[in-house]
């Protein structure tokens, strides 16, 4: 292979914006006249290199790895997962957990059980694609196979995205800027258009609209959750989504779930919210750290779900009227 | 014995992560010790001792903590060998983002926290760029979007490294990190070993106690700022 040291720097920078970013981050400036990368490095003053914090050989190797890495990320961007298989380990008293559960893309599983029973532990096992190396001894297969090490530690193209209860932003960026950055690191072809789509979608999930310019740190809890769900459904390449409770505040849960299902995601939600729990295809009942039972949502439960949804819609309508400053004095009629 | 250098800015979660990892390593029957290097004071030794982990402390005082580290790392290794450890971990705070304790042939870990914001990874110098393993903490407090963008920036800042998330409080992710530590190359001696990058030259009167401010006191290795409103100085 031809060494990148011989490549003209201007062509290299044009073909690989990541290299330009890297050189800028080192505080160095590319030369005006055309030079091969190696020639430019040789011309740099030792003092500039010391300031930059890398030696010539290290920079060359670094730039080569950077180009390879970005190409590898682009190649891996479109990966899909058809199924996830969970093989039981043991519960908190060491008794075997006799479970082998396969979940297909587009399926929603709810995880139920009292606080402290091991719901978060189950989500954590899925998140790290456990291979018998966590306290529960559970194993997770991807498309029927144990995941490779590269899949287990791939950080920014993880198979599993986790939406936790703590969803804060710390960065000083607007919504559009951050989502565009996310789209760029997902190697999306048109990051700006994707960002618009995610933001528009998030706005259909929340009663409180927000503009693309608003700083992410100023979003309300409901707006943040809506944005994270829209992002997970439309933009995140992770085929598996774990949700630690979607609080009902400010998010249209039914629509959120439909959105995730339509994205062909495998969704695990830890929840006792009837709207979500009965909307899932199956429920995992956790007791004493192990999966004690798997319940298929029955036709009767589905009929009850329709009733509960009507009730919820009635409550939501009252909520909306309160927001508008209305009085709620009439005898409230509940749908039957 | 295997030596592992762990570096990262103050409060990123180095001690928390090391405690989690050592718990796992000891479960496998490994004998692990820690050396903690800091500038002025530390209470980390109590945290390690509280977990029953043998710990030695070095305080740099008036010296640059990283220079102090290099002058003492061979002695730390000797201490670890005398104690019969299987694994010795050094914890040091990268205070100026510029020095790094990483040594060729010795597993080099840099800890960064996701709270630092997505712009930070590219600003951290050799400590991050020349590490073998980058551990990202506090991922639990930021949204998954920011977490992913942060991880991406870490990969761009050090494309050769393995990067992984580890929660210093719950220990989520520590298993993978412990597995990496078990595979660290052995370090029988540091005689003849080299730092991965030179530490900055800093020999000016202020290094040796000068306190007076003014042109006449600036001798030796002095570097001046440039201001845009002034013509380029000769
Ligand atoms: N939320 C959260 N807090 C953490 C995490 N890791 C460390 N911390 C907290 O961050 C603070 C600093 O941690 P410490 O280990 O002392 O940092 P060090 O100075 O780098 O050794 C402590 O209050 C820890 O409890 C993490 O992954 N998540
Ligand atoms: Mg510490």
Image (tube, rainbow, N blue to C red):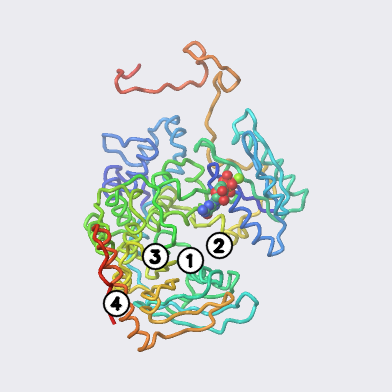
Cα separation between marks 4 and 1: 49 Å
**Residue at disc 1, CB closer than 8 Å to ligand 1:** no
Are the residues under badges 3 and 4 in a single subunit?
Answer: yes
Please rate how many residues cluster around mark 1, counting C-alpha atoms within 10 Å: few if below 14, some from 14 to 19, many from 20.
some
Residue A54 % position (x, y): 46, 39
Left of B75 or right of it: where is A205? Answer: left
Q: Residue beneath label 2, please?
A: B176
Indicate the quadrant of ligand 2 in the picture. Answer: top right
Marker disc for residue A334: 4
- Answer whether labels 2 and 3 touch (C-beta < 8 Å): no
Q: Nearer the viewer, mark 2 or mark 3?
A: 3
Query: What residue is rendered at 64% in x and 62% in y?
Result: B24
Label 4: chain letter:
A
Cα separation between marks 1 and 3: 29 Å
Please rate how many residues cluster around mark 3, counting C-alpha atoms within 10 Å: few if below 14, some from 14 to 19, many from 20.
some
Q: Earlier in the sequence, mark 4 or mark 1?
A: 1
Location of residue B52 by image quarter: bottom right
Q: Residue beneath label 3, please?
A: A247
């Amino acid at each position: 292979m031809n060494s990148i040291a011989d490549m003209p720097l201007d062509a290299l920078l044009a073909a690989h914006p990541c290299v330009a970013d890297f050189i800028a981050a080192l505080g160095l400036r590319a030369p005006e006249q055309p030079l091969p990368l190696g020639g430019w490095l040789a011309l740099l003053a030792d003092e500039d290199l010391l300031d930059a914090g890398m030696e010539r050989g290290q920079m060359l190797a670094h730039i080569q790895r950077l180009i390879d890495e970005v190409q590898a990320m682009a190649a891996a961007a479109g990966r899909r997962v058809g199924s996830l298989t969970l093989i039981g380990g043991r519960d908190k008293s060491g008794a075997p957990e006799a479970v082998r559960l396969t979940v297909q893309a587009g399926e929603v599983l709810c995880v139920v059980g009292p606080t402290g029973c091991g719901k978060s532990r189950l989500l954590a096992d899925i998140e790290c694609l456990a291979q018998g190396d966590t306290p529960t001894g559970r194993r997770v297969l991807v498309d029927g196979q144990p995941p490779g090490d590269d899949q287990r530690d791939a950080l920014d193209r993880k198979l599993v995205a986790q939406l936790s209860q703590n969803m804060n932003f710390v960065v000083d960026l607007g919504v559009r800027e951050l989502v565009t950055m996310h789209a760029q690191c997902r190697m999306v072809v048109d990051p700006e258009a994707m960002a618009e789509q995610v933001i528009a979608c998030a706005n259909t999930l929340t009663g409180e609209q927000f503009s693309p310019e608003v700083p992410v740190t100023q979003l309300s809890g409901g707006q943040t959750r809506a944005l994270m769900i829209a992002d997970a459904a439309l933009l995140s390449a992770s085929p598996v989504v774990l949700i630690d409770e979607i609080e009902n505040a400010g998010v249209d849960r039914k629509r959120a779930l439909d959105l995730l299902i339509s994205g062909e995601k495998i969704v695990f939600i830890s929840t006792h919210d009837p709207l979500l729990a009965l909307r899932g295809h199956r429920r995992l009942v956790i007791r004493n750290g192990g999966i004690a039972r798997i319940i298929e949502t029955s036709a009767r439960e589905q009929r009850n779900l329709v009733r509960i949804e009507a009730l919820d819609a009635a409550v939501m309508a009252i909520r909306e009227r309160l927001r508008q400053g209305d009085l709620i004095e009439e005898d409230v009629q509940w749908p039957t | 014995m295997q030596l592992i250098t762990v570096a990262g800015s103050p409060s990123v979660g180095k001690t928390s992560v090391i405690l989690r990892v050592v718990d796992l390593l000891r479960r496998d029957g490994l004998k692990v010790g820690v050396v903690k290097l800091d500038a002025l004071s530390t209470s980390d030794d109590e945290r390690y001792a509280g977990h029953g982990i043998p710990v030695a402390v070095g305080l740099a005082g008036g010296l640059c903590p990283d220079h102090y580290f290099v002058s003492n790392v061979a002695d730390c290794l000797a201490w670890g060998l005398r104690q019969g450890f299987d694994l010795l971990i050094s914890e040091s705070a990268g205070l100026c983002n510029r020095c790094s304790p990483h040594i060729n042939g010795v597993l080099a870990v840099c800890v960064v926290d996701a709270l630092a914001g997505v712009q930070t990874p590219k600003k951290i110098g050799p400590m991050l760029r020349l590490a073998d393993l980058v551990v990202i903490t506090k991922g639990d407090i930021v949204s998954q979007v920011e977490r992913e963008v942060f991880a991406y920036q870490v990969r761009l800042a050090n494309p050769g490294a393995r990067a992984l998330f580890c929660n210093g409080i719950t220990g989520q992710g520590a298993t993978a990190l412990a597995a990496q530590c078990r595979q660290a190359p052995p370090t029988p001696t540091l005689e003849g070993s080299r730092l991965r990058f030179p530490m900055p030259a800093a020999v000016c009167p202020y290094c040796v106690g000068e306190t007076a401010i003014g042109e006449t006191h600036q001798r030796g290795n002095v570097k001046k700022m440039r201001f845009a409103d002034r013509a380029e100085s000769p």
